[in-house]
Amino acid sequence: MKAIRDIVLRHKAGERIGVTSVCCAHPLAIEAALRHALATGQDILLVEATCNQVNQDGGYTGMTPADYRDFVRAIAQRVGFPVERLALGGDHLGPNPWTALPAAEAMDRAEVMVAAYVRAGFGKIHLDCSMSCADDPVPLPERTIAERAARLCRAAEDAFEVMAADAPVYVIGTEVPVPGGAAEDLDELAVTDPADAIATVEMHRALFAEAGLSAAWDRVIATVVQPGVEFDHDKVVDYRPERATGLSRAIEPVAGLVYEAHSTDYQTAEALAALVRDHFAVLKVGPGVTFALREALWALDAIEAETVPAPRRAGLREVALERMRAEPGNWRKYYHAQGAALSLQLQYSLSDRIRYYWPDARIVAAQEQLFANLRDMVPSLPLVSQHLPLAYAAVRAGTASLDPADLVMAHIAATLDAYHGACHPDA
């Protein structure tokens, strides 16, 4: 993906520039990102799907890679975003969805998945084999992780059938944060040792060469490390630049590579800008965007309660909570509270496990009814100011309407503003 490589090369040449990777699958969040990119004049918008969201079996969204591509492109076409400025990525592509299986079987499935992503036109591929499978030691040896990454890179290269200029770019790394945030309480994180980070790069370089993948190695743009940022259910570990000085400097002499920072959700605008300055030039955001989506939907639910007669109300919040309790598979291993405390976790945890439930048919129907109700009974400006002050500011500025979808997207845009400012400080 030439556009992403160009951003990395500009950063390596000394320009303070980065790229935001928006990792989500909700149509309103995708549309918000596309509209935000149009409004801010971005040359490229990078949207990524994770291996759990989208794979050959459908993932929790029910979409294959080709389905997700068509889904995002359809929204782009509707809002007038040029498809040539849209980059698709695959996040955490590896055996993660199948870790309950023996490694041989899980890796076979991972190869099929990676190939499906590449054939569907995804141009940025994160090769993540850091997790142990059913018959693996814990933790997995770094050489095994790198060998498996090379194997998946080979599957990707074999699947690529278009112009060489648009060949996939890759992200590697063995110190990869858990998708979606930590499951345990956190206070502080160990920053990746600079020597370990460079050793990981060199190990991958050597194994790629042994596998005949030197041409693919030239398209490796980033390695994932831990800069000391993370979040758990209700706390954020903020970036402290002084703790990552050595790590930042270590990547400077490595040609063509920057760091990719995961779990940057909920970092301050200043912290995000510091991350890009310090060569963590690919900023991943996922739950932070869908957390903002949920905030806006809950605000609209509150507005509905004040404006729509009870028999007509959609009751989106109660419907969503009922469905989460009825189908606990996506949150049970993360949330361990009881009673009212569990209700708070289900709704407000920063890990935002509710995002797995938005495709549920009953929740979709409730959201559609909520929007229909608020289009029939348009909320007043004072109510919008009370419940959605960020969207209220956009309405007053003339960049959003009182349509419920517009209000949701305006609220999400405030999160994206911080990332855009970090990646384009001179814009």
Image (cartoon, rainbow, N blue to C red):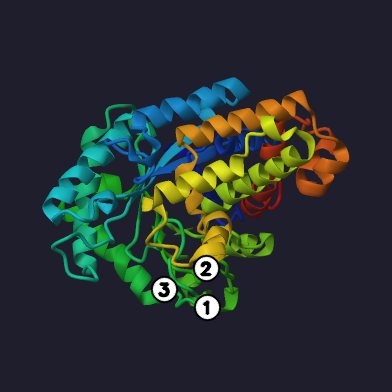
Residue 350 in view (yes/no): no
Q: Residue at x 81, y 41 (%)?
A: 384
Residue 118 rendering spot, x and y as whole percentages: 31, 35
> Which quadrant of the view contains residue 132?
bottom left
Q: Identify the amino acid type marked 2.
A: Val
Q: Which of the two labelled residues, at mark 1 and mark 3, occupies the earlier sequence position?
A: 1
Residue 158 rendering spot, x and y as whole percentages: 21, 36
Query: Spatial distance from mark 1 to mark 3, Cα to Cα?
Result: 16 Å
- Count of picture labels: 3
Check disc 2: other Cα within 10 Å, few if <14, some if 14-19, many if 20+.
many
The image shows residue 254, relative to residue 368, as above or below, that is below
Q: Which of the two labelled residues, at mark 3 and mark 2, occupies the earlier sequence position?
A: 3
**Closer to the camera: disc 1 or disc 3?**
1
Between 223 and 290, the residue placed more toward the observer is 290
**Closer to the camera: disc 3 or disc 2?**
2
Residue with the mark numbered 1: 187
Residue with the mark numbered 2: 229
Query: Spatial distance from mark 2 to mark 1, Cα to Cα?
Result: 10 Å
Q: Which of the two labelled residues, at mark 2 and mark 1, occupies the earlier sequence position?
A: 1
Residue with the mark numbered 3: 192
The image shows residue 54, relative to residue 376, as above or below, that is below
